[in-house]
């Protein structure tokens, strides 16, 4: 059932636009954002991080796309495992979407931007026509000046109609080693469109300073505007393997009748074999009809804790605080806490990021090493690289409160009218205590309802299911006991979410 606030692209919707230059924003929502660990993790990555206005980066990107003039449809490309979280983000801002209809293109694995854009182009071509214009937007960037951005989009769209590629280059404010650069043929001015001479990868500081001083280098924002038929033609010409495999993957994907709706799940056999490279390498460095529009739009890629800290106004000592903290004789320090008081005494130039299950402390000028922390965690199989203490599921969330030998305690929240799968565990018993809301329970051959302060016991081997029939969240405490309490001890018999 589709809720009244959910925006969908129904089969055939928009196809009367074929042959026109319909503008379709394509939001690329991928990447682990490992430099923003421990807040960004694989199962709850950077696009879901909330920024100052209370919206996540993904939500801000959706609203920005919906504000584009005459925007009727938006494509969101993301990992299939993140679909339910992305859908939930959309539902929370549905009133601000101006009836823009959302189509989700779900990747089984991440294969970088060339594969994502190729698959998006096939979708846009099929649904809206080959002359439709794609506006490719990263989901994890911040743009503060919405009015200036929309003005540049209008300029870029006009140029793209004639077959040109338009990329958004950010006028640099300093030598920056964390961004790629675009060299212009000649100098630039804000809002001006000029030809691109070359793309340059992230430089060292000396080269970044040289680029900054030259006056003809811009930061590469990763925002592109182009016609669908143009990108597909150039993928075939300059990245034939990517084109052929993406086309084969799309053909198999669309042979599945379920993918004719607004949720398109890419098949799992061909797509993972597509080379994992960026669209810059695959196409943009090889074409001659590429232009850059010089942009002053309050842009940041929020790529590190340094850039995150710059969103917060400093106090008189240069400290920037998010959350509850006490600072004594401390300067130039950024602190972000999630529920706990942090006291810092007698330090300078630190970054302190506190989450319920992990704490990051480091010098402000060494934050680029956070990515290596994540690599080390993965190498050692530590779950903190992938999971938060609170785990998101299609039906809601669970939080591990305590974990010990032969027992585990969880706080479980089930969304209204959501349901866990009909399942069974071989090794663990479960005790459920209802804290608030109403629970519909299947426990073996019994079906019954529980209210606040009521409980049930599910022995290992019993088929069981938990559902919330109400309009408010269902909150319960689950106590597991047994010799093995791993999350893989589960046999699913029925699941409304297709897991």
Image: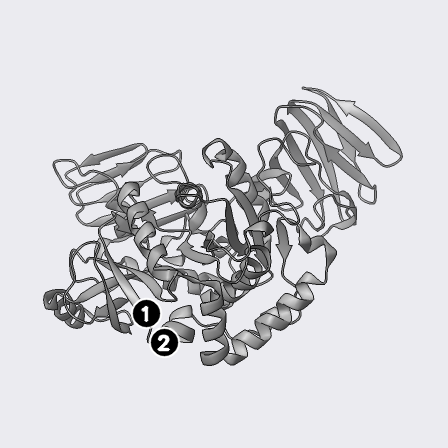
Indicate left or right for 160 with 493 as reference: left
- Report the front residue among 8 and 451: 8
Indicate left or right for 88 with 167 as reference: right
Which of the numbered marks, if any, corresponds to residue 310? none
User: Which quadrant is home to the N terminus?
Assistant: top right
Q: Is residue 282 visible?
A: yes
Residue name at image x 14 percent, y 65 percent: 212
Residue 188 location (% of width, % of height)? 16, 62
Residue 328 location (% of width, % of height)? 18, 36
Label 1: element kind = strand
Label 2: element kind = loop
Indicate left or right for 473 with 222 as reference: right
Residue 202 location (% of width, % of height)? 27, 69
Residue 417 location (% of width, % of height)? 68, 30
Residue name at image x 52 percent, y 44 percent: 389
Q: Quadrant of residue 281?
A: bottom left
Residue name at image x 59 percent, y 60 percent: 126
- Report the front residue among 227 and 54: 227
The single residue placed furthest to the top in the displayed view is: 452
Q: Which residue is mark 2?
A: 287
- Give the CA distance from mark 1 to mark 2: 7 Å
Q: Which residue is mark 1?
A: 290
């Amino acid at each position: 059932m589709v809720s009244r606030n959910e925006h969908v692209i129904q089969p055939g919707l928009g196809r009367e636009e074929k042959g026109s230059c319909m503008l379709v924003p394509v939001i690329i929502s991928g990447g682990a954002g490992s430099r923003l660990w421990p807040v960004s993790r694989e199962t709850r990555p950077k696009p879901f991080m909330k920024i100052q206005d209370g919206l996540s980066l993904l939500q801000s990107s959706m609203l920005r796309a919906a504000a584009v003039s005459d925007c009727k449809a938006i494509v969101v490309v993301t990992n299939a495992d993140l679909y339910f979280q992305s859908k939930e983000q959309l539902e929370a801002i549905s009133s601000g979407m101006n009836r823009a209809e959302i189509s989700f293109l779900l990747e089984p694995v991440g294969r970088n931007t060339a594969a994502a854009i190729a698959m998006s182009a096939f979708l846009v071509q099929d649904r809206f026509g080959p002359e439709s214009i794609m506006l490719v937007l990263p989901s994890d960037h911040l743009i503060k000046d919405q009015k200036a951005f929309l003005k540049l989009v209008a300029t870029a769209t006009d140029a793209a109609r004639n077959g040109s590629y338009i990329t958004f280059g950010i006028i640099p404010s300093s030598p920056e080693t964390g961004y790629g650069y675009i060299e212009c043929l000649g100098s630039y001015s804000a809002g001006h469109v000029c030809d691109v001479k070359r793309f340059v990868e992230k430089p060292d500081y000396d080269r970044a300073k040289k680029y900054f001083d030259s006056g003809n280098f811009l930061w590469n924002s990763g925002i592109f505007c182009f016609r669908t038929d143009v990108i597909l033609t150039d993928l075939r010409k300059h990245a034939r393997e990517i084109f052929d495999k993406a086309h084969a993957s799309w053909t198999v994907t669309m042979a599945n009748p379920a993918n004719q709706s607004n949720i398109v799940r890419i098949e799992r056999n061909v797509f993972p074999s597509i080379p994992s490279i960026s669209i810059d390498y695959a196409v943009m460095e090889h074409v001659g009809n590429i232009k850059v529009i010089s942009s002053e739009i309050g842009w940041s890629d929020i790529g590190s804790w340094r850039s995150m800290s710059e969103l917060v106004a400093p106090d008189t000592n240069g400290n920037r605080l998010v959350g509850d903290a006490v600072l004594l004789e401390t300067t130039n320090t950024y602190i972000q806490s999630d529920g706990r008081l942090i006291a810092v005494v007698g330090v300078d130039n630190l970054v302190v990021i506190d989450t319920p299950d992990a704490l990051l402390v480091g010098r402000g000028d060494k934050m680029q090493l956070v990515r290596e922390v994540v690599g080390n965690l993965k190498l050692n199989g530590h779950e903190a690289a992938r999971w938060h203490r609170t785990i998101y599921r299609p039906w809601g969330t669970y939080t591990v409160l305590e974990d010990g030998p032969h027992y585990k305690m969880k706080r479980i929240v089930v969304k209204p009218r959501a349901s866990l799968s009909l399942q069974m565990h071989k090794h663990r018993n479960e005790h459920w205590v209802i804290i608030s809301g109403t629970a519909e329970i299947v426990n073996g051959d019994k079906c019954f309802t529980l209210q606040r302060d009521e409980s049930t016991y599910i022995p290992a081997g019993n088929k069981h299911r938990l559902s919330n029939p109400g309009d408010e969240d269902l909150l319960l405490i689950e106590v597991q006991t047994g010799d093995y309490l791993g999350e893989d001890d589960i046999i699913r018999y029925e699941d409304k979410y297709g897991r």
